[in-house]
Image (cartoon, helix red, strand yellow):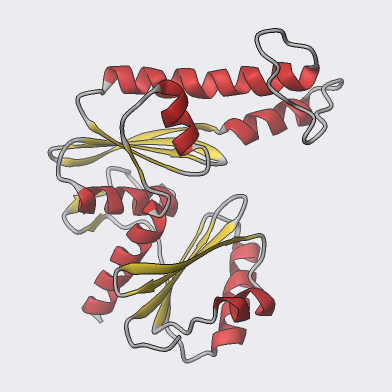
Amino acid sequence: MFANNNVLVVDAGNSNIKLTAFVGDEITTRRSVSDVNVTVLKGLQFFPRHICFASVRDESKTKMILKNLKDFFGESLPIYTLSSLYTLYDLKNPYDDPNRLGVDRWLSVIAARSESLKPTVVVDAGTALKIEFLDDDGYTGGFITPGFKMMTNMLQENTGKINITEGRFEDQGPVIRNTEAAVFKGCWQMVLAFVDRIYREHRERKFIFTGGYGSQIMDELGIEAHYNQDLVAQGAKLMGDKLVMQK
């Protein structure tokens, strides 16, 4: 697909790399992959005007993804590597060192503010569980805790006798019959309790959920809110549009 308004967002998260293809403001393709390679990029059947790239990975892994993108699309294709700024679209970054704010958090806040000027809470439930707060004056920061999968992995890696077999856990009701159930149920209850407390303390605000566990948390807590799986990608697109305009 070729068009001068095609934009590819590449979001390299802790667990997966998300590829989101935009034609104008419409999302036409979503992919979640473990690696960016020729096979993956050919499968998109999409040639962008430019790429908006965001990564929370270490420097070596980030450079490898960028190299693969340049090798496939060519050195001439503009790639905008996004990072947290002091200010963008009238939003101010509250950190003393703006670059220390994870770019995924910054992008989710940009997208949330574009949806609504009302006081808002963003719940991003992925590898990490991130809560962001926006009030009438803008972004006031947020919280980061281990997400559900990170908690279960940490228990397995840092205890001698907990050995969790992938896929063995099945919810069999209130009786805990094995270690897998004890770990999974316990960690899940911690996630629910934390989000529930945030919701009770800020229920007058608009809530936006995103991330792999976002909709499940909403369902289990009975929270009526907006779920947006593309929040970070939309924030990246908005930030990229701004950078293009400033050139």
Residue 238, position in %: x, y? Answer: 29, 64
In the figure, is residue 47 to the left or right of 69?
A: left
In the figure, is residue 237 to the left or right of 126?
A: left
The residue that appears at 28% across and 78% down in the rendered structure is 244
Q: Quadrant of the C terminus?
A: bottom left
The residue that appears at 29% across and 53% down in the rendered structure is 111
The residue that appears at 63% across and 17% down in the rendered structure is 186
Query: Is 173 above or below relative to 141?
Result: above
The answer, for residue 174, to whether it is visible in the render is yes
123 or 216: which is nearer to us?
216
Q: Quadrant of the N terminus?
A: bottom left
In the figure, is residue 176 to the left or right of 165?
A: left
Residue 22, position in %: x, y? Answer: 38, 72
The residue that appears at 22% across and 50% down in the rendered structure is 115
The answer, for residue 98, to whether it is visible in the render is no
Residue 107, position in %: x, y? Answer: 36, 54
Q: Residue furthest right?
A: 161
* Picture quadrant where residue 210 is located: top left
* Picture quadrant where residue 182 is located: top right
Query: Is 210 above or below relative to 44?
Result: above
Residue 241, position in %: x, y? Answer: 28, 72
